Image (cartoon, rainbow, N blue to C red):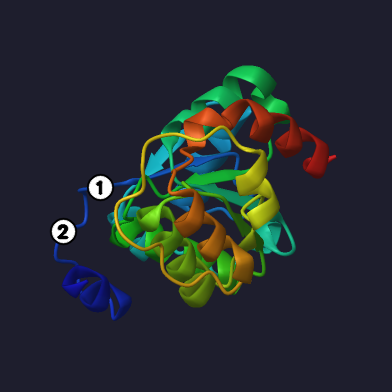
Amino acid sequence: GRRSAWASVGVLSDELSAPVLTFGLPVAGTTPLARLIRSASSDAEPLHLSLRLLLRHPLSSDAGLAAANIFVCENPTVVAQAINSLGPDCAPLVCVNGQFATPALILLRQLRDAGTRLQYHGDFDGGGVAIARRVFAECGAKPWRFSVEDYDRAPKGKALSGAVGPTPWSPALAERMDRTGRAVHEEAVAHDLAPLLVAVRR
């Protein structure tokens, strides 16, 4: 939290740790960061972006990102499976990798400011719901396969620990999860998410 606050005003307290995982961001700029992203995209490879790169070469005004669909997930397994299945046809992805650190937050805010349409999916558990609330509130994202109906369809995992907390994007979700008492982790539904990535992009 303290690092995020300092970074938001340009003070780098740790510029190389906890990079954010990305794939295929449709940038059009000529900065070192934009060139790096395009190079990785041309080879259908995921790319970790550091806070240093994001603050020195922000993407907030990159014209290539305007109105682009960017899908945000919680688990790197989703990124790996989607790229392995779809290769260069996979839609752009950002992975926050759990309780996301400053680079992920800065990137999502820059993508929001550039005019992208951020869509988030995460674990159906207390932590995943908390991340979702933050991504929706702070970065302007919308839910992606993250409703009560999606929870009902998904294979259930380990028991939930504690109350889920509010889910205003799907009000019945929190009650259903609390009543069912079981989590759903992203890797359990990654095979269902991957086909949607290429279908939405086309």
Give the farthest residue toward the top: 84
- Quick one: which residue is furthest to the right in this view? 202
Name the amino acid type tagged 2.
Asp
Report the residue at 42% width, 51% height from top: 125
| Residue type, numbered disc 1 | Ala
Residue tagged 1 = 18
Q: Do the residues labelled 1 and 2 touch (CB within 8 Å)?
A: yes
Residue 1 position in % (x across, y down): 22, 71
Q: How far apart are marks 1 and 2 (CA)?
A: 9 Å
Position of 19 with respect to 35 (left or right) is left
Which residue position holds label 2? 14
- Assign a secondary structure to mark 1: loop
The image shows residue 158 at horizontal and vertical percentages of: 37, 36
Residue 59 visible here: no
Q: In this view, does 118 lie above or below 71?
A: below
Q: Residue at x 50, y 76 (%)?
A: 137
Q: Residues within 10 Å of mark 2 (few under 14, many from 20)?
A: some
